[in-house]
């Protein structure tokens, strides 16, 4: 079983739609959680950190459920520019603070 | 914000030659840098952890003699792909941590290596 699992998609949605991505992680020692965005042939860029209390940044809402070891990302009012691959990323303390990446979920927003 | 400068952006080399990739942290000191590899349609896979002033730590299955890592200063880490072969063609990317763990990591812009 992969340490961080995501539905690879692709998710094809129309502009203005609301879309949700899910992610599960297997290591209960995981401490920090992030969503990164990666455009084709580019480096990943931090979208937002994820906290147990849930956090929102504009049209993006991230949630963490430590008991279920589940992370989610909700995108409201999708824009064409949201088309990218979204990476669920987990930081595990005690392993050199290294990041473990999920396989990514590809989103395609269409006019 | 924190910036990691990675060069070159892309390189094409002949099989059997060596290629050096540089990553510099421009506005923070990176005691540790991470090197990843990404094959098409796959996620980033950690290759090694580069520690300033000491030997790198390699992930299982990554040949340390083939992928030489040097981290001689707090702002520079290099990855040298020695005797490159077509199967080494990939997207190589480094990352550093500018602050505390909760802040996340900053990535270089990546190097697309094609070995012909």
Image (cartoon, rainbow, N blue to C red):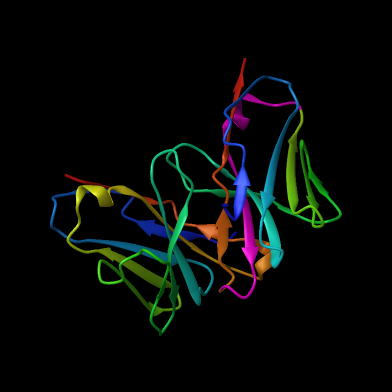
| Residue B17, horizontal then vertical, whole percent | 14, 58
Report the side of A21 relative to A44 (left or right): right
The quarter of the rendered structure image containing the N terminus of chain B is: bottom right
- Magenta residues span A77-95
Report the side of B9 relative to A23 (left or right): left
| Residue A73, horizontal then vertical, whole percent | 73, 41
- Corner quadrant of residue B19: bottom left
Front-lying residue, B52 or B35:
B35
Front-lying residue, A23 or B20:
A23
Residue lying at the far top of the rendered structure: A111
Residue lying at the far front of the rendered structure: A1
| A94 in magenta | yes
Please say if A50 is above or below A61: below
| B85 in magenta | no
Front-lying residue, A66 or A77:
A66
Q: For the point 66% across and 68% down, which residue is it?
A: B101
Residue lying at the far right of the rendered structure: A53
| Residue B24, horizontal then vertical, whole percent | 42, 66
Report the side of A34 relative to A106 (left or right): right
Please say if B6 is above or below A75: below
| Residue A59, horizontal then vertical, whole percent | 77, 35
The quarter of the rendered structure image containing the C terminus of chain B is: top left
- Corner quadrant of residue A18: top right
């Amino acid at each position: 079983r992969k340490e961080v699992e995501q539905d690879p998609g692709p998710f094809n949605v129309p502009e203005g739609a609301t879309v949700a991505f899910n992610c599960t992680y297997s290591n209960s020692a995981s401490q920090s959680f992030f969503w990164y965005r990666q455009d084709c042939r580019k480096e990943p860029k931090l979208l937002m950190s994820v906290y147990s209390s849930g956090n929102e940044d504009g049209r993006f809402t991230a949630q963490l459920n430590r008991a279920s070891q589940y992370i989610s990302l909700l995108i409201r009012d999708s824009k064409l520019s949201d088309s990218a691959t979204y990476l669920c990323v987990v930081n595990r303390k005690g392993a050199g603070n290294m990041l473990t990446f999920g396989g990514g979920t590809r989103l395609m927003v269409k006019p | 914000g924190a910036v990691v400068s990675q060069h070159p952006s892309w390189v094409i080399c002949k099989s059997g030659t060596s290629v050096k990739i540089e990553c510099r942290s421009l506005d923070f000191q990176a005691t540790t840098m991470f090197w990843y590899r990404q094959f098409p349609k796959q996620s980033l896979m950690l290759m090694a952890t580069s520690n300033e002033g000491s030997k790198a730590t390699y992930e299982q299955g990554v040949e340390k003699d083939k992928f030489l890592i040097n981290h001689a200063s707090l702002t520079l880490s290099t990855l040298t792909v020695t005797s490159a072969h077509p199967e080494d063609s990939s997207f190589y990317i480094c990352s550093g941590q500018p602050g505390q763990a909760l802040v996340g990591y900053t990535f270089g812009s990546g190097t697309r290596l094609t070995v012909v």
